[in-house]
Amino acid sequence: MAQQRTGVATFKGNPITLIGPELKVGDTAPDFKLNRNLLEEASLQDFSGKVKLISVVPSLDTGTCDAQTRRFNTEAADLGEHVVILTVSVDLPFAQARWCGAAGVDQVVTLSDYKTRSFGEAYGVLIEELQLDMRAIFVLDENDRIAYVEYLGEMSSPPNYEQAIAAVKALL
């Protein structure tokens, strides 16, 4: 059974249990298999050689997740082709595509953890009680070493956008 971390995060003030390890700066990021759509998968290797900002959200159809994804979509324009921003949620790929189209989000790659929740477990963000991925930010260098990580203590709080973007820029 995977490691459980209880009492480290809340949802609207109520404690939640996170499954998986707490990754740290300097760790090698775990590989993953996430869905781009129902049939096509993506792995960490698909983004090899790029700086990666992985923005994890519980669901794009909530206010904070919507704002987070729009913000990183806007920031992407100034970061260049050497950077890729990935947004990971357990939303179905259909819902992700619909949301991106309606929101005009076109600089962020959305990936779905809906099938196995294995990304959530490997990155320590799977919420046992809700089967959603907890809000978090991971910045990886071109060799997949974690250069920045932010696990949010409260699921409904936004991440520190400025620190995450500064961590990306420090790798360029």
Image: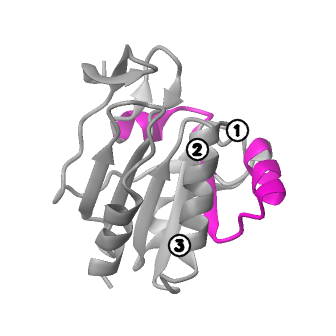
Residue name at image x 73 percent, y 51 percent: 37
Q: CA distance from mark 1 to mark 2?
A: 7 Å
- Assess whether mark 2 and mark 1 are in contact (beta carbons under 8 angstroms): yes
Q: CA distance from mark 3 to mark 1?
A: 20 Å
Magenta-span inclusion, residue 117 = yes
User: What amino acid type should be assigned to the residue bearing mark 3?
Assistant: Glu
- The residue nearer to you, when weighing 13 against 5, is 13
Residue name at image x 47 percent, y 53 percent: 55
- Using the rendered image of the protein, determine whether residue 5 is visible from the camera's viewpoint: no
Q: Regarding mark 3 in the picture, which secondary structure is present there?
A: helix
User: What residue does disc 3 label?
Assistant: 75
Drawn side of residue 100 relative to residue 45, left or right? right
Q: Position of residue 145 (x, y in %)?
A: 25, 64
Q: Name the image colouring.
A: one colour
User: What amino acid type should be assigned to the residue bearing mark 1?
Assistant: Asp
In this picture, which residue range is highlighted in magenta? Answer: 95-122
User: What residue does disc 1 label?
Assistant: 61
First in sequence: mark 3 or mark 2?
A: 2
User: What residue does disc 2 label?
Assistant: 65
Q: Position of residue 90 (x, y in %)?
A: 60, 36
The part of the image, by quadrant, that contains residue 142 is: bottom left
Position of residue 128 relative to residue 154, above or below, is above
Q: Position of residue 23 (x, y in %)?
A: 24, 45
Position of residue 59 relative to residue 66, above or below, is above
Position of residue 60 relative to residue 114, above or below, is below
Drawn side of residue 5 relative to residue 44, left or right? left
First in sequence: mark 3 or mark 1?
A: 1
Q: Regarding mark 1 in the picture, which secondary structure is present there?
A: loop
User: What is the crowding at mark 2: few (fewer than 14 residues within 10 Å), some, or many (at least 20)?
Assistant: many
Q: Position of residue 93 (x, y in %)?
A: 73, 46
Q: Residue furthest left?
A: 26
